[in-house]
Image: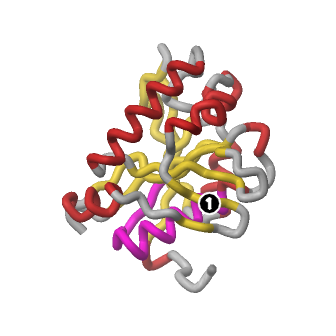
Amino acid sequence: MDGENISRIFKKMPVIECERLILRPMRVTDAEDVYDYAKRPDLTRYLLWSPHPFLAHTKEYLKYVVKQYRAGNFYDWAIEEKESGKMIGTCGFTAIDTEHRSGELGYVINPDFHRRGYAPEAAKAVMDFGFRELHLNRIQCRFMKGNEASLKVAKKLGMTFEGYLRDYLYVKGTYRTIGFCSILRDEYDFNNE
């Protein structure tokens, strides 16, 4: 699938329903829910971005996201818990390489909702979308060394741990070793609904 078709798909961000979650486009009205977790240093410790300093910052970020959706340049869904209607995180593709038919999966869950299986549930739905709708051949995820929770999610998704690249990224003033996991199209269980 070429870049034009990817943009067309994401300009009208599809809604994906899971057992306990709804994956949908982010909205500016999600600002309080996003700020609730984005302000937390314990969450952003292993992320490329720093805690949001105030609610207005989160609102501006979400305005930017909405513009990127309109352009078809943003591939991240809001994760809404069906039971509460609260946005509890995001999951999607941080990058899509159309030439090599690969995507990089990313997920963030509000720590108040950890250990409920929400990250694997959302990520499985996004992986399924990537293989079925985007016809990707490879989906990978990266994580900072020490983030064992992210590695556990990747393994629950059937990904293979490929190893670490030492001092691969310079993040928040220090070099970080980055782990890689992946799953290939021919390894993915299309019947596992």
Q: Quadrant of residue 9?
A: bottom left
Tell me if residue 66 comes above or below residue 124 in the rendering. above
Residue 70 drawn at (x, y percent): 31, 47
Residue 149 drawn at (x, y percent): 70, 45
Tell me if residue 93 comes above or below residue 173 in the rendering. below
Packing grade of label 1 (10 A; few <14, some 14-19, many >=20) is many
Task: Say which of 146 and 7 sits in front.
Answer: 7
Q: Is residue 19 left or right of residue 154?
A: right
The residue sitting at 42% across, 32% down in the picture is 63
Query: Magenta segment: does it hold 122?
Result: yes
The residue sitting at 54% across, 21% down in the picture is 50
Task: Please name the colour scheme applied to the rendered image.
Answer: secondary structure
Query: Which portion, as a residue range, is magenta?
Result: 120-140
Residue 153 drawn at (x, y percent): 66, 54
Tell me if residue 162 comes above or below residue 35 in the rendering. below
The residue sitting at 38% across, 33% down in the picture is 64
Task: Say which of 120 and 38 sits in front.
Answer: 38
- SS assignment for the magenta stretch, majority: helix
The residue sitting at 26% across, 61% down in the picture is 8
Query: Magenta segment: does it hold 133?
Result: yes
Residue 94 drawn at (x, y percent): 41, 46
- Quadrant of the snapshot with the C terminus: bottom right
Please, what secondary structure does the residue beneath circle 1 have? strand
Q: Which residue is mark 1?
A: 22
Amino acid at pointer 1: Ile
Q: Looking at the image, which residue sits at the far front? A: 29
